[in-house]
Image (cartoon, rainbow, N blue to C red):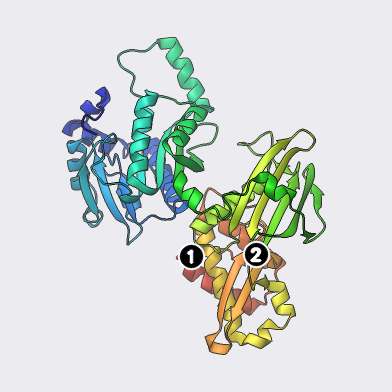
Amino acid sequence: MSNPIKLDFSEKYDEQHAHQYLNKHQTGLSRRLSHRRDEQLARTALALAGDPGLVLDLPCGAGRLWPVLAEKPNRAIIGADNSEAMLKTALSAQPADVVKRVQPLHASAFDIALPDNAVDSIFCMRLLHHIGEPAHRLAILREFERVTRDSVIVSLWVDGNFKAWKRKRLERTRGQKGYQNRFVLPAATVEGEFRQAGFRIQERLDFLPLYAMWRVYVLRKIVQAVETTAAPRCNFEHFWSQQGEWVEKPNVRRGGESGVQRIHSGDGDLLYAKRQTGHIYRSLLHPFGRPTVLREQDALLALTRLDVSVPKVIFYGAQRDPIHNWRALLVTQALDGFVELEHWYAAGGRERHGEAGHERILQALAENLARMHRGRWQHGCLYLKHIFVRVTGEGESARAEVALLDLEKSRQRLTSRTAASHDMKQLRRHSSFSDSEWEKLVYFYRAAFGSAIKGL
């Protein structure tokens, strides 16, 4: 871009202002707590984005979140800002072991001096709420789409919460003085701009739901989403019209019906199609109801990015129907060679593969659960019948794989420990593990999680 856009507010970031910006997040209890919540959201967003290896932090400001970005040992960080004073402050103020991991770059978000698809992810905290013109936001988002290979993590102010209502009322009362450099955006507006720039929304993370204006979005390039869709030519009606054998009798609850059928792809591969009519859940974000399979697909996609073994999503979608209100589908690939853990025990798998094979199952299960819980995801229905295993080889050479199914009740919790405590207690209650087997599972789990979890 030969003549990048320049905004009035960007001129204020001189050396004095840079030091003030650095210090303001460290003064007062409320700001320190706010900073902690920002760090928590950043970690969650990075995990949801697949823990990208090369991240562009733009604008990096005084490097406030560099320590969080540097928590992944092999992550490369480019710290970029339009203000040279901000860059200088960040490089001098942040810990030396963190600074040596950062490559500084003087760049505007409107004109990033990097080639196409140069980084795995762009980390953009506290910029877009300064951008009031839709054309300017779109210019930034399109530049982000050019430079990132996969994802963008971005924060801004959105409406639909108490603080936004209060701010709007206050501005109406006092009027606007001078130029405005902070804007509350309708969520529908900015989400439309994301799509227009070439992104899909993977996740919305609110600072304090229904209260605070801050929201973090995890965005993925649409081209990436298309490439990972196994059946791009198949639409909702294609899969809805297919009929197959029911795995078990459909459940009639939640105001509708839900069941799973075995169907086959055009190539003859076995698929599982969860079909729902009027089967919904309600939450603060969806007070009027949302099909439970959409919550399940959210979990499947998120856990896949966390390297948790789950069925591969082939297709998902939902439509409003005048009779049933909602029709919803989730189609996944069959887990070839996997069986329920309960069936593996009943069929003599432990005797056939020996104690070494059984320990490898416990270790694989523990590692999958630890990855899920570190990402703050809670399974919500963790019974042995929802744990599938595949063991190959014999004795010491046995190899075990574990996959988690039935994630309809899954959700993200505020902390990893909350998710872990719920699932592990539930698994203990509803499993047939002996005390010694449970101790082995917990040993492997704690080793994979990286810290002690009390109460297991």
For label 2, count other residues whose C-alpha is less than 10 Å away and answer few (under 14), some (14-19) or many (20+): few
Ranked by sequence position, the earlier of labels 1 and 2 is 2
Taking 174 as reference, is 1 above or below it? below
Horizontal side, residue 11 vs residue 296: left or right: left
Q: Quadrant of the C terminus?
A: bottom right
Q: Nearer the viewer, residue 295 or 370?
A: 295
Amino acid type, mark 2: Asp
Residue carrying label 2? 269
The residue sitting at 65% across, 61% down in the picture is 405
- Judge whether residue 201 can be spotted in this image: yes
The residue sitting at 49% across, 41% down in the picture is 200
Q: Nearer the viewer, residue 379 or 426?
A: 379
CB under 8 Å between discs 1 and 2: no
Q: Nearer the viewer, residue 388 or 334?
A: 334
Horizontal side, residue 57 vs residue 323: left or right: left
Amino acid type, mark 1: Phe
- Judge whether residue 124 can be spotted in this image: no
The residue sitting at 65% across, 77% down in the picture is 435
Q: Secondary structure at mark 1?
A: helix
In the image, which disc is placed on residue 165?
none
For label 1, count other residues whose C-alpha is less than 10 Å away and answer few (under 14), some (14-19) or many (20+): many
Taking 456 as reference, is 31 above or below it? above
Q: Nearer the viewer, residue 44 or 304?
A: 304
Rounded to the nearest whole Å, what is the CA distance between mark 1 and mark 2? 35 Å
Horizontal side, residue 391 vs residue 6: left or right: right
Across the whole image, how many numbered discs are drawn on residues? 2
Q: Secondary structure at mark 2?
A: loop
Q: Quadrant of residue 41?
A: top left
Q: Position of residue 61 (x, y in %)?
A: 27, 39
Q: Quadrant of the N terminus?
A: top left
Q: Position of residue 381 (x, y in %)?
A: 68, 58
Residue carrying label 1? 449
